[in-house]
Image (cartoon, rainbow, N blue to C red):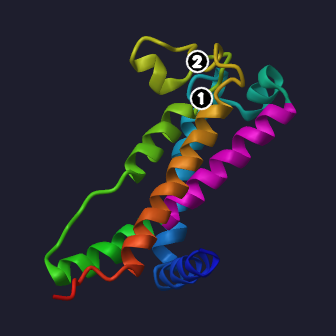
Amino acid sequence: MLKAIIEKKHLIKKIVKEHVVLFIVSSLIFFIIFYLLTLATTTDHSLGIFIMMNGVSYTIWTFFLLVVIALLLGVYISLIVYSFKIKMKAKKIGGSIGIVGMIVGLFSAGCPMCGAFLFGLFGFPLALFFMPYNGLELRVLSILILVFSIYLISRSLTKCKIRKK
């Protein structure tokens, strides 16, 4: 079991190194999107006001988790591109659940006091305010879903799909 995990870790490192520009660019783009959505409903889109309303520790946890989500999305996209290239050669294309992690992450971006931008589109602008940890649990859920999807992709890349007759 440990050997399989180490094998997947090495594969992920190799793929991210091959697609380092894609990893960095996609991670930055997703972090900027999360940052903008987090401050979208805050007065003047101000980080200072966000900190005053939510506290320093909440703000630190929020942005730390958003950075982790953005980095995981960068890894996920690098793996998807690598997997897509391999599957195009074999003419075999499949889906993944990583998109769910991205969507959960997008919904978790927002200010609990001012209202989350995407929840507001569906008529629930203060949804994060009523959650026990003001939406931090959605960010953790997003991280768990992304880690699971990265695991599934790396597992599919390390398993041989050819069956012996």
Residue furthest to the right in view is 56
Amino acid at the residue labelled 1: Gly
Quarter of the figure with residue 70: bottom right
Given residues 127 and 5, the one toward you in this image is 5
> Is 70 covered by the magenta stretch?
yes
Find numbered disc 1 in the image and state the secondary structure of the residue it sits on: loop
Image spot of residue 50 (x, y percent): 74, 27
Say left or right for 133 vs 119.
Answer: right
Rounded to the nearest angstrom, the CA distance separating label 2 from label 1 is 6 Å
> Is 58 covered by the magenta stretch?
yes
Residue 37 is labelled as: none
Q: Earlier in the sequence, mark 2 or mark 1?
A: 1
Question: How many numbered marks, from 0 up?
Answer: 2
Say left or right for 83 vs 77.
Answer: left
Residue 110 is labelled as: 1
Q: Quadrant of the N terminus?
A: bottom right
Dominant SS in magenta? helix
Residue plotted at (56% across, 33% down)? 108
Q: Please report the bounds of the magenta region as a residue range.
A: 56-75
Q: Are marks 2 and 1 in contact (CB under 8 Å)?
A: yes
Residue plotted at (73% across, 48% down)? 64
Find numbered disc 2 in the image and state the secondary structure of the residue it sits on: loop
Q: Give neighbour class at mark 1: few <14, some 14-19, many 20+ (Cα, 10 Å).
A: many
Image spot of residue 69 (x, y percent): 59, 51
Residue 114 position (above or below residue 85): above
Residue 128 position (above or below residue 109): above
Residue plotted at (73% across, 34% down)? 47
Amino acid at the residue labelled 2: Gly
Residue furthest to the bottom in view is 164
Image spot of residue 153 (x, y percent): 41, 67
Q: Quadrant of the C terminus?
A: bottom left
Q: Which residue is mark 2?
A: 115
